[in-house]
């Protein structure tokens, strides 16, 4: 057998293993379901003890005290006494389904070549068969914004639900926003082993901002003209000016956030979101004034400033909440796809450092839904919204007690099995037999 045939067989076998990664998506909801007796975390900061949560045809039809609903009106009753029910958690600024194996270039669709790519749609590259998606659902992550990476303007994100046959089925909100990476005002000169990392002004900072301004001005000019010949990147920018799309600005420093917000206001952008926001607390008054929400970076990291409180990242959500800034939680960073499953536990860290626990739940439910513009259908347990929710044995922000017994996406009861649970069951049986 020659080398080419051997390689062909290898890649076929790899493909077959990937095809087995995801369970068959759940069928449409049949009959009305009522969850009884659970502590309901509504998602807006309130809690209902001994609750009743009812849903039919994928929509919530009752959410409140158990005393206010009749179990006989439902086809199925789930006794969740002593347990907790939550809205499905939402991962903002993720790359779920865009990369499966980092070392395999053919499975990496998170970035394209170029600097200004607003017309690149991450949705059509989203792989619903990803095993990584499968590992997120048992922790309650049932929805995600799939966002591109790279360049100055990376492209367009979309919001998906995480139990689908294909990207068309997955889409909850297609092309919700465009992602802009604001330049850093300072650059690291490299790690200094004799002392703190040294930073120097970025000599290209003003130049890159002029290029961004020029691009936006060019888009506005094109959109006001005859639009001939058709310019697809400029066409994609239209939603930023008419309010149908949001501008997600990746910026961390005080100066960068200030410059980015002023830029967006000057350009006539209707809705913007700061993504990252490590120093957002320093400009919280400005953010509140202009109603700019912040999708905060994962807190499990060291602060950037050498004179910063070492626990500053943990306290950031509480500081913004005190100032009245809407804050959610985003998932970019090192090993981001596999770390997406830890979304509720990052929120739990914010709760451990000053943020009210229900407000921490709100960060990854209603606040993230508001940031993405899907709060009409998701983010809280309210009548009329999608029945995307789950039942946990305990506190969902604690990895020791967030053990899911049931999960539903738009009323469909989804599988909580994964490659990891399959291995756990296999080896549990093995060692039971050997004892």
Image (spheres, rainbow, N blue to C red):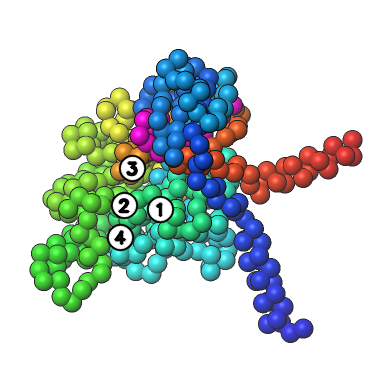
Image quadrant holding the C terminus, namely top right
Mark closer to the chain start, 3 or 4 = 4
Q: Which residue is mark 2?
A: 176
- Describe the element under mark 3 as helix, strand or loop: loop
Is 384 included in the stretch rendered in magenta? yes
Q: Residue furthest bottom?
A: 2
Of marks 2 and 1, the one in the foreground: 1
**Based on the displayed image, in which of its 4 quarters is residue 385 positioned?**
top left
Give the magenta part as a residue range: 378-393
List the single residue furthest toward the front: 72
Corner quadrant of residue 223: bottom left
CB-based contact (under 8 Å), mark 2 and mark 1: no
How packed mark 4 is, by other alpha carbons closer than 10 Å (few <14, some 14-19, many 20 or more), is many
Label 2 crowd bin: few (<14), some (14–19), many (20+), radius 10 Å: many
Q: Position of residue 263 (x, y in %)?
A: 18, 51
Q: Are marks 1 and 4 in contact (CB under 8 Å)?
A: no
| Label 3 close to label 2 by CB (< 8 Å) | yes
Residue 138 in view (yes/no): yes
Give the Cα distance between marks 4 and 2: 15 Å
Residue 125 at x, y percent in the picture? 44, 62
Label 1 CA crowd tier, 10 Å (few <14, some 14–19, many 20+): many
Q: Which is more N-terminal, label 1 or label 3?
A: 1
- The residue indicated by pointer 3 is 374
In the rendered view, tell whether residue 77 sits above or below residue 146. Answer: above
Q: Position of residue 21 (x, y in %)?
A: 62, 55
Residue 18: image location, x then y, percent: 62, 61
Q: Nearer the viewer, mark 4 or mark 2?
A: 2
Q: CA distance from mark 1 to mark 4?
A: 22 Å
Among the two numbered marks 3 and 2 on one chain, the one whose residue lies closer to the N terminus: 2
Disc on the earlier residue, 1 or 4: 4
Q: Which residue is mark 1?
A: 171
């Amino acid at each position: 057998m020659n080398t080419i045939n051997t390689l062909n067989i290898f890649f076929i076998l790899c493909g077959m293993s990937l095809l087995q990664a995801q369970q068959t998506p759940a069928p449409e909801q049949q009959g009305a379901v009522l969850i009884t007796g659970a502590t309901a975390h509504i998602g807006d900061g309130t809690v209902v003890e001994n609750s009743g949560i009812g849903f039919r045809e994928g929509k919530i039809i009752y959410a409140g005290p158990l005393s206010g609903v009749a179990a006989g009106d439902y086809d199925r009753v789930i006794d969740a006494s002593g347990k907790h029910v939550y809205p499905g958690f939402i991962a903002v600024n993720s790359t779920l389904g865009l990369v499966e194996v980092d070392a395999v270039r053919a499975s990496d669709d998170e970035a394209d070549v170029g600097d200004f790519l607003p017309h690149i749609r991450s949705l059509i590259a989203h792989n619903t068969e990803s095993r990584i998606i499968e590992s997120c659902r048992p922790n309650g992550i049932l929805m995600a914004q799939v966002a591109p990476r790279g360049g100055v303007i990376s492209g367009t994100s979309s919001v998906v639900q995480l139990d689908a046959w294909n990207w068309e089925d997955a889409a909850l909100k297609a092309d919700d926003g465009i992602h802009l990476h604001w330049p850093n005002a300072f650059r690291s000169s490299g790690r200094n082993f004799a002392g703190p990392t040294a930073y120097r002004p970025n000599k290209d900072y003003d130049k890159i901002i002029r290029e961004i301004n020029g691009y936006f001005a060019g888009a506005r000019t094109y959109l006001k003209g005859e639009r001939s010949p058709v310019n697809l990147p400029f066409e994609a920018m239209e939603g930023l000016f008419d309010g149908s799309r949001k501008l997600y600005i990746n910026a961390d420093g005080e100066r960068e956030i200030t410059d980015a917000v002023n830029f967006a206001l000057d350009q006539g952008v209707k809705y913007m979101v700061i993504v990252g926001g490590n120093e957002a607390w320093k400009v919280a008054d400005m953010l509140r004034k202009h109603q700019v929400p912040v999708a905060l970076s994962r807190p499990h990291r060291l602060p950037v400033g050498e004179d910063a409180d070492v626990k500053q990242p943990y306290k950031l959500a509480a500081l913004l909440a005190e100032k009245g800034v809407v804050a959610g939680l985003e998932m970019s960073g090192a090993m981001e796809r596999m770390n997406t499953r830890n979304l509720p536990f990052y929120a739990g860290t914010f709760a451990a450092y000053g943020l009210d626990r229900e407000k921490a739940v709100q960060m990854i439910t209603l606040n993230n839904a508001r940031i993405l513009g899907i709060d009409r259908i998701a983010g809280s347990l309210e009548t009329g919204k999608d029945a995307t929710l789950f039942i946990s044995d305990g506190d969902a922000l604690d990895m020791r007690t967030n053990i899911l017994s049931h999960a539903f996406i738009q009323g469909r009861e989804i599988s909580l099995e994964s490659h990891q649970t399959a291995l756990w069951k296999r080896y549990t049986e093995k060692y039971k037999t050997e004892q």
